[in-house]
Image (cartoon, rainbow, N blue to C red):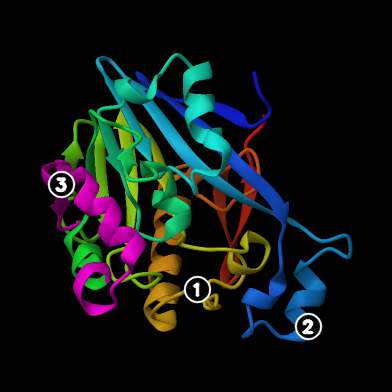
Amino acid sequence: MDKGIFPFKVGDFEVFVLVEAEREGSASIMPSATDEILKKYIPAQGFMHGCNAFLVKTQGSNILIDCGTGMDDVIINKMISLGVEAKDLDTVLITHLHGDHIGCLLQGDIPNFPNASIYFDAKEKEFFTKTSINEGAVKTLDSYASRVKTFSASSLTASIKEIVPGISAIANYGHTPGHTVYLIESKEEKLLVAGDFLHIALIQFPHPELSATYDNDKDEAAASRREILDYAAKNKIPLGAMHLSYPGIVNVIAAGSGYSFEDLNP
């Protein structure tokens, strides 16, 4: 299988990490990290920064969680290699409305996924279409029109509600006002797909209190990050994210006042 595709089973669900790109990461997006932290956790040779999407194949349903920037149709071509044409996609679950997560929704002015409904948290729509208007997000949502669906994500302290069968939405606000983590469940197996809950794993696992320049509310993002890491570690749930390097899914381990992670075997 293409090195940029990592397969993972969750009960009856087939999940595929689709790597749109990997590039050299930059610790400059973590201005609150001290020189001591940078020296301890960032290798001299540097580190890689991923841009991923997640394809979920279930019986009778094809679901994409985020879709990348749309660069060179990488995500669409990887879907096709897995037997899923753009027209076969019926659901796109969006973690948040930044361009590197929704860029592939459009080709110019035309929806790439003509039969898909687009789901995301209502707070996200309010923020990016009214409070801090993002023209790219507005254009994308207008293009999908009535197929745009919003929800109120569940708190981890409340009863978690399914958005589509087998996938629930967990509020993970802070990076953006409606940033969402998705929990995939089938036959008592689980996977968290955590969007941009962090940007530099090497620093933010051991120091979840440190936020990136991209985080809209840095304190809220830090609290949400620690909450989801604690949930994953305590419940032994593998965790995938859009900016983890390949394979894009890790096991989370409590370690002192923070956490560590182990990549799954490719």
Between circles 3 and 2, the one closer to the viewer is 3
Q: What residue is shown at x 31% (from left), y 22% (from top)?
A: 87
Q: Tell me the residue that label 1 is attached to.
A: 214
The reply to whether callout 3 and callout 2 are in contact (CB within 8 Å) is no
Residue 18 image label: none
To which quarter of the image does residue 164 belong? Answer: top left
The kind of residue on which mark 3 rests is: Ala
Tell me the SS state at disc 3. Answer: helix
Task: Report the Cα–Cα distance between label 3 and label 2.
Answer: 49 Å
Near mark 1 (Cα within 10 A), the count class, few <14, some 14-19 or many ≥20, is some
Near mark 2 (Cα within 10 A), the count class, few <14, some 14-19 or many ≥20, is few
Seen in the picture, residue 90 relative to 141 is either above or below; the reply is: above
The reply to whether callout 2 and callout 1 are in contact (CB within 8 Å) is no
Q: What residue is shown at x 27% (from left), y 65% (from top)?
A: 178
Question: Where does residue 69 sit, x and y in percent of width and height?
Answer: 49, 49
To which quarter of the image does residue 62 belong? Answer: top left
Magenta span of residues: 128-153
Q: Tell me the residue that label 2 is attached to.
A: 36
Q: What residue is shown at x 36% (from left), y 73% (from top)?
A: 174
Tell me the SS state at disc 2. Answer: helix
Seen in the picture, residue 198 relative to 90 is either above or below; the reply is: below
Residue 131 forms part of the magenta stretch: yes
Tell me the SS state at disc 1. Answer: loop
The kind of residue on which mark 2 rests is: Glu
Question: Where does residue 125 sit, x and y in percent of width and height?
Answer: 21, 63
Q: Tell me the residue that label 3 is attached to.
A: 145
